[in-house]
Every structure is written in structure tokens, then in C-alpha cells.
Image: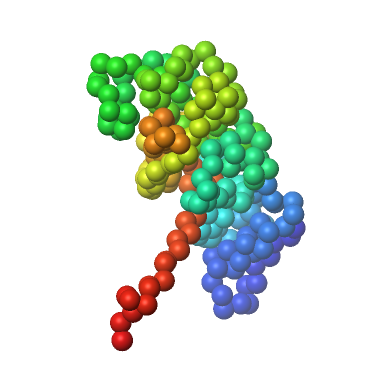
Amino acid sequence: MKLKIDRSSSVPLHKQAEMLLRDLITKEEYKEGKMLPNEVELSEQLKISRNTLRQSINTLVTEGLLIRKKGVGTRVAEKNLYSEATNWLSFSQEMKLLGIKIENFELHVSKQAPTENAKQFFGITDDVKILRLERLRGKENFPFVYFHSEFNPNIKLDGTENFIRPLYEILENDYNIIVKTSREEIRAAGADQFIATKLEIEVGDPILIRKRFVSDVNNLPIEYNIGWYRADSFSYKIESIREPKTSSQNSF
């Protein structure tokens, strides 16, 4: 697609470039995260400076429409994955419903002292070793979440399980544990060096941190899980319903 700036227009060059890029990334050929032409090529085609072009690109990066990676280039952001707060699902179930095939890039199992959150949730002491599962997961060639799970030591998980299987399927089928409740905490943060390396982003890039405190049908704590998500690939939607006042609560 040939991009051209209208020099006779009163619209600033960077805004024209921005509008041209907005139109470009809606084209079929640029869906599914395709890379844009490099900045030198684009600036030459538009006959504008690279600084002016960067101003346009920065706007689209801020809006989450483009993703820029140092040393690689700029690509079109794929449609964000959404998670709903109602009728919560495991990560594998969420992705299956979205038609996304998940890949495990890393999988680590160890016995460790509990983190402070896990210790409080399970009501255990520092000297108790618990099973820790760490996984880097995502779509093909695109890791977008790093998970860290700790399990109640009363569950007889020993680390030899096949964690390629969905976790809650293992708990239900192998240990007769049916998870029911997930209390969640979500916050935004900047990626530290460890997470930036895992998710292939820059230090300080935005991420979403999602903590889950999972209990079974008997309200027994089962799993403490924390996930670090690339903010350009995951959104969380919450629907709240306000109960109407009863007639005795109405004021006149």
C-alpha cells in the first residue's frame, strides 16, 4: 500500500502520518501481529523525518495498537485476550474458549519455602516446603504470561505429575479436588528485569499482575497463583450488578 502525505493540507505532518498508519494496520495483510516496514523505509516513503514518524507511531503504541520492540521493530498488536470476572475459568479453559492453542515455553517444578502470601493463605510456617510450579506460557512464538503457583502441602502433589495437562483437570481427576472459588487481585506495574526477559519486553514496560487465591468446594485453600501478563496482550473485564433497593429502602 502506497502511503502519501498531502503537503497542501493544514493537518500537521505527524497527524497525517498517524491517520495513514491507522488505516494501514486495519488491512487484512497487517492482522495477526505483522511487522510494519522499518522506520527508515516508512519515513522515506512519506517524505518526513524519522522524528515526525516516531511521534505518530508513539501515539499508536500508547493506544495499544502497535507494539515496538528494541532491535526488532514495530508490529501490529493482536486483539487483546479478555478474561471475565464472572464464572471464572482456569487459564487453559479461558484460552480454549477463545480458540487459542497454548504453548508452554518453560515449565519448572520445585519444592520451596512458601512465599508470604502462600504462607498466610494456607496457614503454614516458613519451615514447611511446598510444591511450586512455574510456567512461561503463550501462543506460538509469543510468550505473554509467566505463572507462579504454590499448593497447599496437604495436597499430595509430588512434582511427578504431567503438568502439560490442565492443572485443575489433574487436581480433579487424580486427587478428587474440585476447585470452586477464586479470589483475585489485579494491578498494573512496570516489568522488572526477570519478567521483562521472560516476556521479551523492555524493563519498565507495562504488565498486569494477577493474583489468585483458589479454594475448593469445601472452602479449603488449594492454590496461590500469581501471573505476570504482557499488558499489550491481556485485558480484564468486570461486570457488576447493582441490586435494586427494596420498597422499605426507598426514600421520598
State the quadrant of the C terminus. bottom left
Going by the picture, which residue comes out furthest to the bottom? 252
In the rendered image, residue 149, in percent from the top left (x then y), is placed at 43, 28
Viewer can see residue 50: no
Answer above or below: position of 102 versus 134: below
Instruction: Tell me the residue at 41%/71% (across/down).
Output: 244
Quarter of the image where one finds residue 139: top right
In the rendered image, residue 43, in percent from the top left (x then y), is placed at 61, 55
Answer above or below: position of 174 versus 220: above
Which coloring applies here?
rainbow
Answer above or below: position of 114 versus 5: above
229 or 162: nearer the viewer:
162
Quarter of the image where one finds residue 164: top right
Instruction: Tell me the residue at 45%/36% (across/down).
Output: 217
In the rendered image, residue 94, in percent from the top left (x then y), is placed at 58, 42
Instruction: Tell me the residue at 54%/58% (across/down).
Output: 60
In this rendering, the count of numbered labels is 0
Viewer can see residue 152: yes
Instruction: Tell me the residue at 39%/43% (across/down).
Output: 183
121 or 70: nearer the viewer:
121
In the rendered image, residue 228, in percent from the top left (x then y), is placed at 44, 38
116 or 24: nearer the viewer:
116
Left or right relative to 22: residue 252: left
State the quadrant of the N terminus. bottom right
